[in-house]
Image: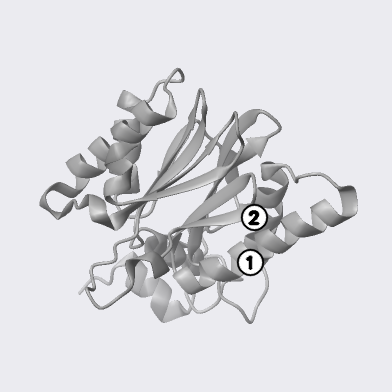
Amino acid sequence: MDISTDMQHQAMGYDRTATMFSPEGTILQVEYAQKTVRLGSSSIGMVCTDGLFILADKRSEDKLMVSKSANKVYEIDSHIIASAAGIVSDARVLIEKAQVLAQQHRVTYDSPIEPELIVKEISNMKQQFTQYGGARPFGVSMMTAGLNQDKSELYVSDVTGNYFSYYANAIGENDEKIREKLREKYKKDLNMKKAAKIGLEIFKEVQGSKFDIARFELVYIDSKDKKIKKLDGKEIENF
């Protein structure tokens, strides 16, 4: 009986540590972490003509849970927001690290930190956990959006510590399907209201009968007043 490549790798111990490459040149623990990310709830981020936003599925279906306690989008600083897909407890560690970095920059330089500097530091931390023994990789992809003076910026960093800047992107469950639809529908001249409507339409198409707007939260930053605003459930429809 033939043994699959994955089974051979496991038998040889290539998946037991984050510091060992398989014969195919991959780190299996990192690949497993990437699969974990795709099990997490989805978020869509977009850069618009009048600001930026992250639209996130909180996936909070338990009637006993206080829905407002299940935040999916976090405030890093007064001009930066972030969402994560994957293991929420891993994400919390990275979010708190980002918040500390933002405040340290304000105290040291008396100015708001650039979003990319936050993303770079967090990505460096992720990369370290794919290189040294005794710890597993962070099972998290992070989407970070913020204002760099008057310019709206959106970044996504993956499990490996790679990051890129985007006009629009998605993380979490069905991320590739959502990205395909974003490539079709996203335009650089969209304002936030039109873009948010497109985001909801995409979620509705992908989730089908499971779609429920009550599970979603929209956090946005208007490039004029530069303040973070948050909407939940039905409030998003009014927006």
Q: Position of residue 57 (x, y in %)?
A: 33, 54
Q: Which residue is mark 1?
A: 96
Q: Is residue 130 visible?
A: no
Please state the horizontal and vertical placement of residue 96, each as a whole percent of the image: 63, 66
Of residue 60 and residue 154, the one placed in the foreground of this image is 60
Q: Residue at x 68, y 72 (%)?
A: 132
Q: Is residue 66 visible?
A: yes
Residue 129 position by quadrant:
bottom right
The residue tagged 2 is 123
Q: Residues within 10 Å of mark 1 (few under 14, many from 20)?
A: some
Q: Is residue 193 above or below residue 173?
A: above
Q: Quadrant of the N terminus?
A: bottom left
Identified by mark 2, the residue type is Ser
Vertical relation: 183 (above or below) 13: above
Point out the tag, 1 or 2, that comes first from the N-terminus: 1
Q: Is residue 164 above or below residue 42?
A: above
Give the structural element (helix, strand or loop) at label 2. helix
Which label sits on residue 132?
none
Residue nearer the viewer, 153 or 112: 112
Q: Nearer the viewer, mark 1 or mark 2?
A: 1
Seen in the picture, residue 68 relative to 196 is either above or below; the reply is: below
Residue in the image at 60% along x and 41% along y: 146
**Residue 110 x/y as whole percent:** 86, 47
Q: Are circles 1 and 2 on residues that touch, CB within 8 Å?
A: no
In the displayed orientation, state which residue is furthest to the left: 209
Residue sitting at x 58%, y 30%? 223
Mark 1 → mark 2, Cα distance in angstroms = 14 Å
